[in-house]
Image: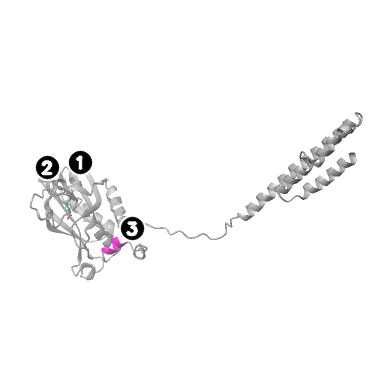
Amino acid sequence: MKEQLAKIKSEALAAFGAVASPAALDELRVKYLGKKGELTAVLKQMGRLTPEERPAMGALANEVRAALEGAIESASKKLEASAMEARLKAEAIDVTVPGKPVKQGHKHPMYSALDEIKDIFVGMGFTVLDGPEVELAELNFDRLNAEEGHPSRDWSDTFYFDEDSRVMLRSQTSPMQVRAMDTMPLPIRIIAPGRVYRKDEVDATHSPMFHQVEGMVIDKNVTMADLKGTLNLLAEELFGKGTVTRFRPHHFPFTEPSCEMDVQCHKCGGAGCPTCKGEGWIELLGAGMIHPNVLRMAGIDPEEWSGWAFGMGLERTAMRRFKIADLRLIFENDVRFLEQF
Ligand code: PHE
């Protein structure tokens, strides 16, 4: 029996040491330690031993069982470790392989121009306002001193939502003047950029949707000189020191006096070229001193307060700022065009 045990032990240990898979290991475990296993079979013969022989043989049997169990344990650990190693090898990532480049976008040139404009005005203490594109005709026209019958109210120019022409896509950012007067304490310094809509056919300089930036100041003793000083500074900041501007008389219902500001052509320096259509000047914005009627309708006393306002086309400004010839390029979003900025 002693020899039997020794034989089982040495055979089993050799077998466990060489085992190659968890399934094979399990088979071996059953073969030696299972209910019908070899060691179990030997132990079953213990009954035949004399009481004197039994303790020593029992101890030996236990030692063999412990040795086998230990061998199983370490074989199973070895299998686990090599399985993990194989998996790590199979799933290895080569961090030195160059990555696939991700195309990174950047800001649209028009929004870069808008950011510059915002920075300039925020630096002068202005607040940036946002407002609705679907607007009441009351704010877009009536409150801006453009009464019934004003040509800009015509259905051929404006997108209305209803038969009685009360709700519309705003045709200018100027209703933001009224919204600011109605909601903000005086004095007021605001700019309000956003989309506006007019029934225009698309061409090199027109689009039914475009962007404006409205600007307005209301304070005591505000004059046309403040307007000109501020807008000249804007032109220099946007287009470079020494940029020459020109103010031409104009008409808007909500400003009096009204003007348009031109910037001397950056291409020809005023001599006249295709960019400025031979004029030497490029129109940039409309502006003026806020009409007393507009102040009065907002409950502001024009004897005590005065103000100025301007509205500039953002696409036009971006076109000038980045020397873009055709408005359509701004909206087409062709990456070959956009990548240049
Ligand atoms: N709203 C005018 C336009 O769209 C521009 C403007 C704004 C003029 C403010 C004067 C004052 O043409």
Is 109 or 46 nearer to us in this picture?
Answer: 46
Q: Quadrant of residue 108?
A: bottom left
Marks 2/3: CA distance? 38 Å
Residue at coordinates 28% horizontally, 57% vertically from top-left?
Answer: 238
Label of residue 315 in the image = none
* x, y percent for residue 71: 77, 43
Which of the image's four quarters has the C terminus?
A: bottom left
In the rendered image, which residue does mark 2 sit on? 297
> Which residue of the protein is positioned furthest toward the top in this rendering?
51
Q: Residues within 10 Å of mark 3 (few under 14, many from 20)?
A: some
Q: Earlier in the sequence, mark 2 or mark 1?
A: 1
**Residue position for label 3:** 108
Which numbered mark, 2 or 1, is in the foreground of this view?
2
Q: Mainly helix, strand or loop, the magenta region?
A: helix
Residue 187: mark in rendering? 1
The residue shown at (76%, 45%) is 28
Q: Nearer the viewer, residue 170 or 89?
A: 89
* Amino acid under disc 2: Met
Q: For the point 22% across and 70% down, which residue is it?
A: 274
